[in-house]
Amino acid sequence: MAADPKAMKIEAARAALGHVEDGMKLGLGTGSTADEFVRLLAEKVAAGMKVVGVPTSVRTEQLARELGIPLATLEEEPALDLTIDGADEIGPGLSLIKGGGGALLREKIVAAASKKMIVIADESKVVETLGAFPLPIEVNQFGLRATMIAIEEAGRRSALTGEIKVREKDGKPFVTDGGHLIVDASFGRIPATKAFADDLNMIPGVVEHGLFIGLASLALVATPGGVKVIDGKH
Ligand SMILES: O=C(CO)[C@H](O)[C@H](O)COP(=O)(O)O
């Protein structure tokens, strides 16, 4: 297989398609790798496969709609069979960092409403310890400074320090589909992932964070030598 990043994303997405069965209710992730899955799924739908997709972002909704995939909201289909999504980092036990595309809140809600979550990625996303990728944290706009201070304090309790900044797009604060802001925390390696995640969950202004722990059950990781299957124990 070529080491071209786009080709690797397509191969991971193609492998995920092998887990999709007729009649499934699917969570559709967000990002360039998830987009490749949506494109391949659309080909299957055009060929007669019956599925319903629940998108994790307005972006994915638009793509899936354009390509003719039948869609529902999570209100209409609150229990899903399978979610396929990308990740920014894949760590031990299939712990993940997500939110590089700013969709982490809906991605986590949809993954939690699914019997199974499969992560698709190229091998550059697999890490020994999460944290080289700045951790996206979705926060309420109200009380932003107080929330950022509380995030710094939570970091210090886990021996984590580093820059935290409000994500911008086109020179303005990036606003999520839910109307919140994203704070990216460049804390570096996060060994005590669960303890830090729990601490972040205690901050009232934190809507959700990009640490996904215990949600993914399988990762399909494209390498130049083929797609590697990682279960929850690597
Ligand atoms: O979490 C995400 C979006 O919120 C994406 O899954 C993550 O950023 C990976 O994206 P890509 O496949 O483009 O590398």
Image (cartoon, helix red, strand yellow):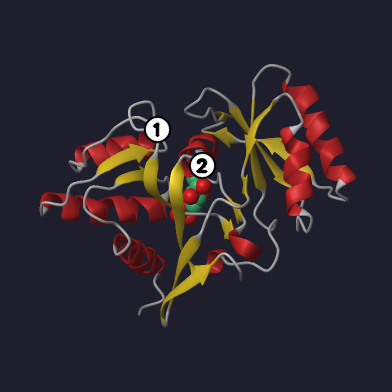
Question: Is label 1 in a helix, a strand or a loop?
Answer: loop
Residue positioned 82% across, 30% down in the render? 149
Amino acid on which the number 1 mark rests in the picture: Pro
Residue 27 in view (yes/no): yes
- Residue 206: image tag: none
| Lower position in the chain sequence, tag 1 or tag 2 | 1
Is 41 drawn above or below residue 13 in the view shown?
Answer: above
Residue 68 x, y percent position in the rendering: 17, 41
Q: Residue furthest bottom?
A: 225
Question: Is label 2 in a helix, a strand or a loop?
Answer: helix
Is disc 1's CB within 8 Å of ligand 1?
Answer: no
**Residue linked to disc 2:** 112
Residue 208 x, y percent position in the rendering: 63, 34
Residue 78 x, y percent position in the rendering: 40, 32
Amino acid on which the number 2 mark rests in the picture: Ala
Is 174 drawn above or below residue 34 in the view shown?
Answer: above
- Residue 78: image tag: 1
Residue 91 in view (yes/no): no
